[in-house]
Structure formats: structure tokens, C-alpha cells
Amino acid sequence: MTSDDAEQDPQSQHPGQTLPYPGHESQMQEQPADSMADYVGRNLLQGRAAVVTGGDSGIGRAVAVAFAKEGADVVISYLSEHDDAARTEELVRAEGRRCLTVAGDLAADEHRHEVAAAATSEYGRIDVLVNNAAFQSSVDSVSDLTLDQWRHTFQVNVEAAFFLVQDALPSMPSGSAIINTASVTGLRGHRTLLDYAASKGAILAMTYSLAQSLLDRGIRVNAVAPGPVWTPLIPATLGRERAEQFGAQVPFDRAAQPDEIAPSYVFLASNRMSSYYSGAVLAPLGGQVLGV
């Protein structure tokens, strides 16, 4: 999940719709492309077991379905979007793979334990862990950012990712992969998403550190840092005007669809494709150039 501002005077590109947080995809006027309908798997993850947090919709759904098309069984965790999670489960099962859904707040320690335990109980191991769930809420000025919001953002975006890794590690054999969802905001910062950008910067540093710490265990750790991606989080958190203009600021002149981002996760999850990658960041940014 990621977002970015329209910095100049772009034309409206999306419906002027707002949604209550956390945003149900089934209520969006403009549905994201996140079912990987045209994606053809090549058994890159055959027989593997994957956990995808925030797997009910958007990037998480596209990743879960892509993994299923590559032969993986999936556990998806999500907050409370039961209708969206049911749709993801349906798409995974349509590929002949098993799917377990686990609802709850990853800000809570007990739920993180529950997710890892459910995956281990269902599949006996965890071969791929995707830390994708995130919280964001924009503020107009620095003084508007409250301590409660700061703490909640880091609980969901950083603490949950790290401690889910801790809980999953006993079930992760050599050859496993951890993939963290970062963001262009973690690479460049953001004027109205201060806590979110800071948390995504922390995710990048954590990715680099875990890659080094888990090298001896044969577990690869990488990240995907997308630019603007059209997901339910956007109309649920950015407000009507910014949601309308979302994605217009990048050189491609549009936000990505989740289906365009999910193959990066397949690449990093597959030992056949990325066995020499650890501590790396893939940044699908719609033509933006890092460092500029």
C-alpha cells in the first residue's frame, strides 16, 4: 500500500469518492485491477506456503493470487474487510490452491502470534512472508500529527512487520524469503505523510538489517518500494481532491494498478528468479528516477 501527492496542477484521473477507513474495495467506484486475470504462472512457487498481510485487496490481493498461480498455498491476514478477503480467497482457490484468512489488528501482539501460528498449523511451515499491511493518514501540518497517530502508524507498519518475522522464523526453512512493502515515500519523504514516510524509511533499514542477520540461515530479505498505486487505501485516507489527482504527478501520468506491482513480489519470492538477491529494493515508480 502506498500513496503520493499531486505536486503541480494535474487533471482529475479518478472518481471524486471518499471511503471510511480502512476502505472496502467492493465499495470503490473505480475498481483496481488486482485479480491477476491475465497472469500465467510457471510453477515458480510450486508447493510453497506464503503469508501475505493486508491480503484482502489491492497489492496484497494481487500478490496472493499471483503466488497461487505460481503454485503456492496462501494465508492472508487483514483488518476487517471481510467481503474483500472472501473475494481474495475465492480467487486463490480458483487456482486450485488452499487459502486461509485471518482477521484482526496487526498492531496487537496477540494477533501477530495468531497469524504465524495459523500458517504453521495449516501448512506446517512458512516459505514466504510478505509484510504488506500498512496504515496511513495525511496531516496538513507538522503540528497536526498526534503522538497517538505516530505510535499507531509505527505499530502497524514497522513493529508488526518485525515481530511477525520473529514469530515466523521458527517455521521458515533455509531457502525461504521475506518481502517487505516499502514505498517511494520512504525513499524521498512526504510533506503530508510524515509518520507514514518515516515508517517506510524504517522498513527499508529493517530490510537491509534483516538481510544481513538472516544470511546464515539461508533466508533472503528484500523489499518492494512502489510509487502511487490505486488501492482502497487511497480514497479512504487522502480526501476527495487528492484521490481524484492521485498518480498524475509521475512521468507515466497515472497510478499503477496492483496487478503491475505483484510480479515484483513473485520475482523476489522465487529462488529460481532471485536466488542472488538479498537486501535489495525493487522500486516500480512509474518513470520517476531515484536521486533526482
Image (cartoon, rainbow, N blue to C red):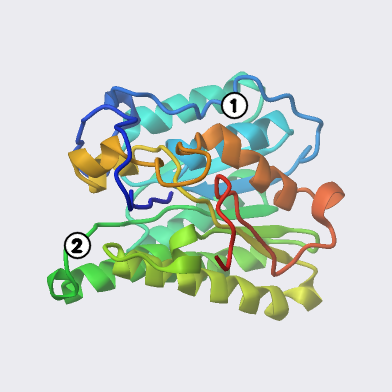
Q: Nearer the viewer, residue 70 or 140?
A: 140
Q: Is residue 126 visible?
A: no
Structural distance between the alpha carbons of marks 1 and 2: 34 Å
- Tell me which amino acid carries mark 2: Val
User: Is label 1 in contact with label 2 (beta carbons under 8 Å)?
Assistant: no
Q: Nearer the viewer, mark 1 or mark 2?
A: 2
**First in sequence: mark 1 or mark 2?**
1
User: Relative to residue 132, is residue 76 depicted above or below?
Assistant: above
Q: Which mark is residue 245?
A: none
Residue 47, image x, y percentages: 77, 39
**Residue at 76%, 41% in the rendered image:** 45
Question: Please, is residue 196 above or below residue 208 in the view?
Answer: above
Give above or below for 29 relative to 68: above
Q: Quadrant of residue 177?
A: bottom right
What amino acid is labelled 1 in the image?
Met
The one of 201 and 66 positioned closer to us in this rendering: 201
Residue at horizontal 60%, vertical 55%? 283
- Which quadrant of the figure contains the C terminus? bottom right
The residue shown at (33%, 33%) is 82
Q: Is residue 277 left or right of residue 7?
A: right
Q: Estimate the x, y position of residue 218 in percent, counting from the top left.
A: 80, 68
Which residue: 44% across, 56% down?
114
Question: Which residue was labeled with disc 2?
Answer: 139
User: Splitting the image into 4 quarters, where does residue 57 fall?
Assistant: top left
Is 84 displayed left or right of 220 in the figure? left
Q: Secondary structure at mark 2?
A: loop
Q: Is label 1 in a helix, a strand or a loop? A: loop
- Read off the residue under disc 1: 36
Left or right of 133, for residue 29: left
Asked if residue 264 shows in the view, the reply is: yes
Could you tell me residue 55's position as x and y percent?
Answer: 47, 41
